[in-house]
Amino acid sequence: MVQRQGIFVVSLDFELGWGVQDINRGGNYDQNILAVYDVVPRLLQLFEQHDIHATWATVGALFAGSMSEIKAYIPMDRPSYKKKQYAPYELIDNKLIYEQDVRYFGKSLIQQVLDTPHQEIGTHTFSHYYCLEDGQTSNQFKQDIEAALAIADRTYTSIIFPRNQANKDYLDICKSLGITAYRGNARHLLYAPQCHEAGWKWRRVLQIADTYWNLTGHQTFPINEIKKNPIWNIPASAFMRPYHRKLHLLERLRIRRIKEAMTYAAKNKEVYHLWWHPHNLGKHVFRNFKALEEIFEHYDELHKTYGFKSKNMQEIVDEMEKKERG
């Protein structure tokens, strides 16, 4: 299989309050969530300016316009996590989300994404479903994805598993529902899929360190290493961790780490897959967008010099399927 250019993949875990509901019961993260209403238009403008093709893996519940609408799509078989707070349904049952709570309903934002060229809407499950947590079942996962399909009234090419809990036992279910690709974890032991709290502290320390220093390699790969088993795995390369005031002296290292990996991918005609959540940018917005602008300006140079090309996950699948058919 011949690859003539390197590929720059961007994917976003688009979830608003559903992604942090179990750790934000006190509202401490609401600033970041509410800021997404400013972040998304700015991101889309930046993507258009630099011709960035991106996949927005969207929590299905965001398609609802109100609490009464979402109730019509809640699966009969809800996830039976041992840690009950992982399921968002108690927020709904106990009326802790009000009727048109903008922290949880994002139809207007989704429409902006749909109206922007080269942006793919993928799924991030219906309820921000955790596929490796104790207690949940394959049938519950299947019903969750069916709900995501129903409320969006659309098919999906791509899925991104919440908290990167890529459960290989569930890939056949994804395939049966028309999904053809997922974002796999970065191919290093440090990023192997695990339950949320398994080895969390030491992994988090090392992952943060890897943001600034090259501990795990560039995590780029040739396109012919994207495998279909039973759906295409487009692995992550790096999480674009947001600006942190206490680590501001290391900021240049953070950006350099990403740019060096992009350059390696461009020169060697490989794939580099960068991801983040829109709400990550909701604090220190100016500094986060300044970093993104520098990264995308670097992409522009790599595009001119080496033919480095931006593609979303669906576009990569289309290319892989075409080559598979011969």
Image (cartoon, rainbow, N blue to C red):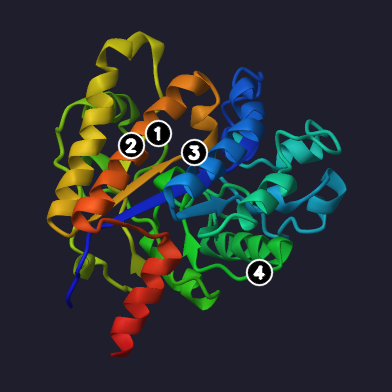
Measure the alpha-carbon separation of dots 3 and 2: 16 Å
N-terminal-most mark, 3 or 1: 3
Q: Position of residue 112 (x, y in %)?
A: 66, 49
Asked which secondary structure carries label 1, the reply is: helix
Say which of marks 3 and 2 sits in front. Answer: 2
- How dense is the environment of label 3, judged by Cα within 10 Å: few (below 14), some, or many (20 and up)? many
- How dense is the environment of label 2, judged by Cα within 10 Å: few (below 14), some, or many (20 and up)? some
- How dense is the environment of label 4, judged by Cα within 10 Å: few (below 14), some, or many (20 and up)? few
Asked which secondary structure carries label 2, the reply is: helix
Task: Judge by depth and name the residue closer to the eye, 99 or 325.
Answer: 325
Q: Which numbered marker is on residue 277?
A: 3
Asked which secondary structure carries label 3, the reply is: loop
Asked which secondary structure carries label 4, the reply is: loop
Q: Tell me the kind of residue under disc 3.
A: His
Measure the alpha-carbon separation of dots 2 and 4: 32 Å
Question: Is residue 134 visible in the rendered structure shown here?
Answer: no
Q: Mark 1 and mark 2 in contact (Cβ < 8 Å)?
A: yes
Residue at 19% across, 69% down: 4
Task: Judge by depth and name the residue closer to the eye, 230 or 251.
Answer: 251
Q: Mark 3 and mark 4 in contact (Cβ < 8 Å)?
A: no
N-terminal-most mark, 2 or 4: 4
Residue highlighted by disc 1? 292
